[in-house]
C-alpha cells in the first residue's frame, strides 16, 4: 500500500443530520434526560449538545417544560416525530447502500489478494465492516487468521480469535482494515509492524464519516 497524507473533510450536513437524529431519539426514549446525559448519548461536548437542543426547539421539533427540583422535561412535538422518522429512513437507506458497497469492495480486495497468493490474512478492527469482510472471505480461498482489536472485551468473533497484540509479520501475508473507528491510530500501529504493501483497505473507507477523527491515508 502506497500511502500519502490526504485529508478527507467530513460532510457537515451529514454529521448534523446524524447528531440531530441521535438527539431526537434520546429524548423520545427518556423525556427527563439531562443535558449532560444527552451530550453523552450524542458523543459530543455539552455545549454542542445544548446548541443542537436549542436549534430543535427553534424548529418546533422539541418542547421543553419545567419539572420539580429545577429539572426540565423534553417532548417531541408532532413535527419532531415526523423529522425523526424522516431522518431514520434516510439513515437506514444510506447504511444499506454503504453495506452493499462494502461487500463489493471487500470481495474485490480479497479476490485480488488471493490471486497474488496471499492466503494468511489478518483483519484489523471490530465493526459492522468486520462481519461483511468475513462473509466475503469465507467465499474465497484466503484464510482469516485472527482479528486484531485493542481492548475488544471479547476473545472471539464468529469463531475467529480476537487478539489485542499484533501477530508477527512473518505469520501474516496481508492485513485488511475492517475498522470504522480509530482508523488513523490503527494504521500508524500497523505501519510499525508491517510493510506498506501488506496493508490494505477498501476505497469506501476514505468516504466514511468519522465523528472524532479524519482518515488521512489513501490506498493506491
Image: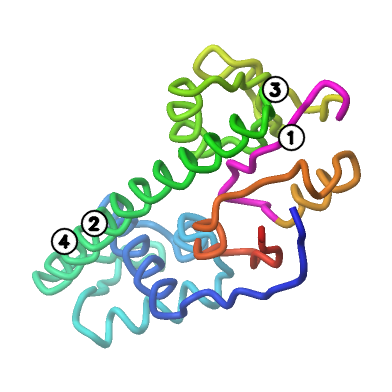
Asked if residue 17 is positioned above or below residue 171 in the image, the reply reads below
Is 180 magenta? The answer is yes
- Which contiguous range is marked in magenta? 169-183
Determine which residue is flagged by label 1. 150
Viewer-side label of 1, 3: 3
Between 150 and 21, the residue placed more toward the observer is 150
Q: What element does badge 1 sit on?
A: loop
* Mark 3 neighbour class, 10 Å CA radius: few under 14, some 14 to 19, many 20 or more: some
How far is disc 3 from disc 2 in space, using C-alphas? 35 Å
Determine which residue is flagged by label 2. 93
Between 13 and 8, the residue placed more toward the observer is 8
Determine which residue is flagged by label 4. 85
Viewer-side label of 2, 1: 2
User: Mark 3 and mark 1 in contact (Cβ < 8 Å)?
Assistant: no
- Provide residue 109's location: percent of width, then percent of height: 55, 42
How far is disc 2 from disc 1 in space, using C-alphas? 31 Å
The tag on residue 79 is none
Q: Earlier in the sequence, mark 2 or mark 1?
A: 2
User: Mark 3 and mark 4 in contact (Cβ < 8 Å)?
Assistant: no
Query: Who's the residue at 40% across and 62% down the image?
Result: 69
Q: What element does badge 2 sit on?
A: helix
How far is disc 1 from disc 3 in space, using C-alphas? 20 Å
Viewer-side label of 1, 4: 1
How far is disc 4 from disc 3 in space, using C-alphas? 44 Å
Q: Earlier in the sequence, mark 3 or mark 2?
A: 2
Determine which residue is flagged by label 3. 120
Is 122 magenta? The answer is no
Q: Earlier in the sequence, mark 1 or mark 3?
A: 3
Amino acid at each position: 500500500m502506497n500511502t500519502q497524507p490526504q485529508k478527507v473533510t467530513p460532510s457537515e450536513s451529514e454529521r448534523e443530520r446524524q447528531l440531530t437524529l441521535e438527539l431526537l431519539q434520546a429524548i423520545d426514549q427518556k423525556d427527563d434526560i439531562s443535558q449532560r446525559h444527552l451530550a453523552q448519548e450524542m458523543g459530543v461536548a455539552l455545549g454542542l449538545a445544548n446548541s443542537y437542543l436549542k436549534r430543535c426547539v427553534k424548529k418546533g421539533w422539541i418542547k421543553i417544560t419545567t419539572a420539580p427540583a429545577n429539572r426540565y422535561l423534553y417532548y417531541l412535538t408532532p413535527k419532531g416525530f415526523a423529522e425523526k422518522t424522516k431522518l431514520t429512513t434516510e439513515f437506514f437507506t444510506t447504511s444499506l447502500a454503504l453495506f452493499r458497497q462494502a461487500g463489493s469492495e471487500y470481495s474485490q480486495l480479497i479476490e485480488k489478494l488471493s490471486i497474488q497468493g496471499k492466503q494468511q490474512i489478518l483483519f484489523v478492527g471490530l465493526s459492522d465492516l468486520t462481519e461483511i469482510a468475513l462473509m466475503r472471505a469465507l467465499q474465497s480461498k484466503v484464510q482469516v487468521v485472527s482479528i486484531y482489536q485493542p481492548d475488544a472485551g471479547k476473545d472471539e468473533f464468529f469463531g475467529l480469535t480476537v487478539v489485542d497484540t499484533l501477530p508477527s509479520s512473518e505469520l501474516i501475508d496481508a492485513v485488511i482494515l475492517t475498522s470504522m473507528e480509530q482508523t488513523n491510530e490503527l494504521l500508524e500501529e500497523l505501519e510499525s509492524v508491517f510493510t506498506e504493501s501488506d496493508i490494505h483497505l477498501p476505497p469506501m473507507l476514505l468516504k466514511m464519516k468519522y465523528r472524532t477523527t479524519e482518515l488521512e491515508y489513501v490506498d493506491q
